[in-house]
Image: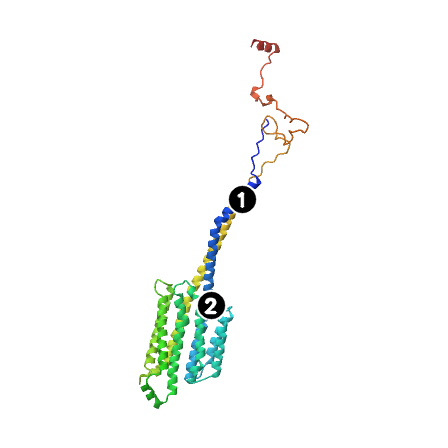
């Protein structure tokens, strides 16, 4: 039995579909704009933090050999003032260590010109080989330039931009206060030795009556103030509740350094006291201060490096999370856009001019344009016989009725 063909669903016009797609894309862009802005801001801030941390780690790498170089120069000055053999090997070994660090980096701190000038001054002082009181002036320039280089490293390390607790205090202690202690301790010991070497036994009593050497007094005052700055700076940077627990390991070397600095200050104060034995203890006290200062410098730099490593790992984790979040947002946005702009299913295609044999209906649907003839009215479609539409139960069955009886029955009605 023929079935009527299903009518075609109306399809949206191409222009309307394009407008809908454009609106979907526009809404998606508007929604993603704040997310993109936030992503760029966070990426830039973490990038700046990563750059700051890298610069600080470069400063730590430079500070270690430069601090050893300063201690070697102070020892060389002290030995030259006492007219003992100067060991230039220790100084040149420290220079090689600084050169090794400098070659491994691209000069992120912009200190290479200063370092070249300092190395030339050190070579000049070693080549002059001055002894006695003249060694104080001969080594003064290299020692001062080394301290200035450490200050430059601290300034170029961008530590003021570090949000980490105690970062500035740790840097100031390791690159400024402790080097000042080493230099001032060497200056005090060298001045005491130079005074003894240049003063005869007959004039020593008159010098004691005249009072202490003002240069020695000034150097001792600087030593006391720089040692106090070390304790103040570390306690400010390691206050409980404001920093990492690793900084608690600085307390023991700090106490040992403070005890050595106090011993040297007491020894210096007794230099002009007759029969105090201070001049015999000055050498050991100076060596003890230098040893404890270098140990504390190493501990401070290690604590700072641990803090920087933790910060670098944290920033790297934040950037990984940002990248993962951006990928998820982009994939989700692309999926939504694809689902929104995907076209409907393709319509059923029929052969033009023919009807579906299994379609229901009273007559066929001619193809578009077939019902219009150029020479007359539209052609009437072929109708279906109504008897073909009757179900089978209505078909006549039983014995046949004669035609005359059918006629009589019809007339009677």
Where residue 301 appears, x then y in whole percent? 42, 69
Please, is residue 95 above or below residue 211 in the view? above
Q: Tell me the quadrant of the picture where the N terminus can be found.
A: top right
Where residue 224 appears, x then y in whole percent? 35, 75
Tag shown at residue 362: none
Few, some or many residues within 10 Å of mark 2 (<14, 14–19, 20+): many
- Residue at image mark 2: 58
Q: Is residue 386 visible?
A: yes
Q: Is residue 332 visible?
A: no
Element at label 2: helix
Query: At 43% across and 72% down in the image, what residue appears?
Result: 151
Please, is residue 381 above or below residue 267 in the view? above
Is there a contact, CB below 8 Å, between mark 2 and mark 1?
Answer: no
Give me the C-alpha separation between circle 2 and circle 1. Answer: 53 Å
N-terminal label among 2 and 1: 1
Where residue 63 appears, x then y in whole percent? 44, 71
Q: Is residue 281 left or right of residue 56?
A: left
- Residue at image mark 1: 21
């Amino acid at each position: 039995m023929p079935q009527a063909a299903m009518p075609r669903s109306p399809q949206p016009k191409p222009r309307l579909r394009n407008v809908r797609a454009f609106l979907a894309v526009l809404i998606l862009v508007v929604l993603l704009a704040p997310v993109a802005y936030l992503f760029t801001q966070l990426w830039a801030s973490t990038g700046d933090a990563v750059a700051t941390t890298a610069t600080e780690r470069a400063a730590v790498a430079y500070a270690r050999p430069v601090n050893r170089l300063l201690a070697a120069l102070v020892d060389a000055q002290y030995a030259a003032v006492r007219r003992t053999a100067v060991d230039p090997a220790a100084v040149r070994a420290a220079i090689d260590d600084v050169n090794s660090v400098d070659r491994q980096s691209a000069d992120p701190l912009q200190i290479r010109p200063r370092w070249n000038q300092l190395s030339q001054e050190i070579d000049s002082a070693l080549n002059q080989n001055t002894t006695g009181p003249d060694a104080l002036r001969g080594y003064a320039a290299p020692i001062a330039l080394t301290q200035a280089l450490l200050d430059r490293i601290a300034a170029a390390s961008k530590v003021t931009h570090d949000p980490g607790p105690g970062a500035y205090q740790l840097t100031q202690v390791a690159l400024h206060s402790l080097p000042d202690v080493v230099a001032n301790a060497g200056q005090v010991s060298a001045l005491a030795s130079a005074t003894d070497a240049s003063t005869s036994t007959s004039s020593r009593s008159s010098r004691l009556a005249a009072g202490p050497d003002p240069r020695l007094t000034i150097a001792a005052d600087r030593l006391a103030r720089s040692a106090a700055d070390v304790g103040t700076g570390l306690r400010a940077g390691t206050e409980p509740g404001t920093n990492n627990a690793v900084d608690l390991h600085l307390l023991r070397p700090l106490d040992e350094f403070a005890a050595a600095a106090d011993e040297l200050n007491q020894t210096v104060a007794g230099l002009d006291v007759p029969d105090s034995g201070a001049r015999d203890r000055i050498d050991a006290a100076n060596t003890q201060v230098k040893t404890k200062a270098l140990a504390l410098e190493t501990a401070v730099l290690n604590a700072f490096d641990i803090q920087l490593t933790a910060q670098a790992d944290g920033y790297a984790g934040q950037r990984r999370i940002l990248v993962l979040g951006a990928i998820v947002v982009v994939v989700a946005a692309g999926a939504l856009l694809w689902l929104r702009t995907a076209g409907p299913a393709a319509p059923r295609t029929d052969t033009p001019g023919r009807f579906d044999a299994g379609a229901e209906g009273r007559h066929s649907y001619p193809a578009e344009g077939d019902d219009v003839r150029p020479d007359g009215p539209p052609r009437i479609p072929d109708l279906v016989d109504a008897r073909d539409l009757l179900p089978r139960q209505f078909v006549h069955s039983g014995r046949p009725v004669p035609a005359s009886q059918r006629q009589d029955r019809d007339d009677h009605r």
